[in-house]
Amino acid sequence: MKRLLLRILPVLLIVSLFLGACAAPVPAVPLVVIAPSATPEPIIIPVTGATSAVTPTASATSVAPQSDDVWDRIVANNKIVVGTAMDYPPFAYVDPNFQVVGFDIALIREIGRRLNIPIDIQNFTFEGLPGALQLNQVDLAIAAISITPERSSRMSFSPIYYVNQTAILGRNDSTVNIADLKQVAGLRVGVQRGTVYESMAQSALIDTQLMSADKLLSYMQADEAVRDLVANRVDLVILGQATARYYSAELGLKIVGNGFVQQDLAIAMRPGTPRLKAEIDRVMDAMLIDGTMLSLIQQYIQSDILNVLPTPIPTNQPTATAVPPVPTVAPPLCWDGMKFVADVTLDDNDMKNPPFIKPGEGFVKTWRIQNTGTCAWTSGYRLVYAYGNVAAAHMNGQPVNMPGNVTAGQVIDLSVTLIAPTAPLTYQGFWQMENASGLRFGQTIWVGITTLADPENPPSTVQPPAGNYCSVTLTAPLSSVTVHSSFDAVWTVKNISGTAWSPDSVDYKYISGTEMQEKDVYDLTETIKDGESAKIIVDMVGPATPGIYNTKWAIVSGNKTLCILNVSVTVIAK
């Protein structure tokens, strides 16, 4: 039976290729098919003009196993929650219209269509995807994930849907031609942190003492490494060949080496989910047989980069030495997890209606998030800027440390102070959680604004302070409050503006953050002369859910801000 299948399956694929070519001209791609046996040799079907090997893997079909808890949850909720990392083109990324696109996105949507189950795609840190699976925050993970021994000990995998070769990217004026990884030992090399490419460089170059550790630079995102390559801060970047071709086409860079170690890409699942895996395998097998997998590969990976493909490696060239597999490590004592709950301020409606901020103006973005992991967040945990649609999407944002311990299940409001860029544009800046060891985890959250003014609806905003008008001390609450309980937020404010603040010209009002107040605007109760201090009091009520909440108020005179009043409130259960 095995021999028969090995003969029939390639014929079916060749027929599929022929019919697809008759319908519409597409770039030719060589196909490597692995038959449904334990460890067979690949059957290589050469196609004229082929430049890379694509390896969808056909798996053996059988009677569906008994259900599992993840599949039961999918059926009950009528949706598949999928985690991805939207920062790795051409697999998953945000396009100029703020839409999530890429090969992985198209693949998982087609799987959902064939299963007749809606797909809910959520953006995570790449490093945090294994934790999201373990914590049941997502049902599947697809993010150009390579199968490795370490990952296989913690995750279950679908059939391989693409074989991605390792590539080395250089600037267009680079004169190097890398045929062996040892050739990069004396150069500055960039890699994305947490990827197989970082592990490969570490094992082959650093651990063997061929390269000094300061020559290997690890980046949170691949595009950061590529930007430093363009800026001549690194000499080369090691990454997947499909992504290298994307950046080569977009930025005029050059692939100076490829091959080395191939990466088998697959969809990841939590171990112990046999029914879920069987359903995914069944659909992916059908997509392989009917040519859909090849069509998606041609659409998202091959066609837009056909003219910049490097010369294929001759078949008689010696095979590069494989990097030793990463040893299996013990699971962590606890898992970090973070879930986005709500936009407390500046809701952009999924970038459909980003709020207007005047160019150069300061503003505060506040998110409500939840600790969905089993690790407590200490003061060493922080929210950090990750990437954006343009470099200016950083908006001068600085890391925000946790104000105190955040236990598992607890909800907290986190705020960052930003400055709107001066160029008239729409900006989307992505932020991620980082633990005390510097590892990113959880959902990726974003702030979206526009500095493109609407002349028919000019915004009315409170201006940030233009000078030093006051000094502030938070007087209350100094301890936690219980849910639904009434309390006062009290600030002791000293007027150092040089002029008196009178009740008829000065107010204090809510600006942003969690709305715990009973009313939004108060008049001063007395005149505060220059050099004098007074108490500013706001009546508040604790939110219904325990957590740490932040809110921001301001003392204002018209549109002029005289003083910023911040308070962080810890809410506990009764």
Image (cartoon, rainbow, N blue to C red):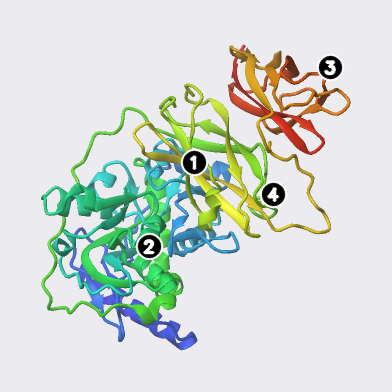
Q: Quadrant of the C terminus?
A: top right
Mark-to-mark CA distance, 2 and 3: 57 Å
Residue 525 disc label: 3
* Label 1 Cα crowd, 10 Å radius (few <14 / some 14-19 / many 20+): few
Taking depth in this image into account, of 19 and 9 the one nearest to the observer is 19
Left or right: 150 as drawn, with respect to 222: left
User: Measuring 68% from the left and 18% from the top, which residue is drawn there?
Assistant: 491
Mark-to-mark CA distance, 2 and 1: 50 Å
Quarter of the view holding residue 6: bottom left
Above/below status of 247 relative to 83:
below
Residue 357 disc label: 4
Mark-to-mark CA distance, 3 and 1: 60 Å
Q: Earlier in the sequence, mark 2 or mark 1?
A: 1
User: Measuring 68% from the left and 36% from the top, which residue is drawn there?
Assistant: 465
Residue named by callout 2? 231
The percent coordinates of residue 155 (x first, y second) are 33, 44
The percent coordinates of residue 559 (x first, y second) are 79, 39
Q: Nearer the viewer, mark 2 or mark 4?
A: 2
The percent coordinates of residue 411 (x first, y second) are 56, 28
The percent coordinates of residue 194 (x first, y second) are 32, 47
Q: Identify which amino acid the numbered label 1 is placed on.
A: Asp
Q: Dot 1: what SS?
A: helix
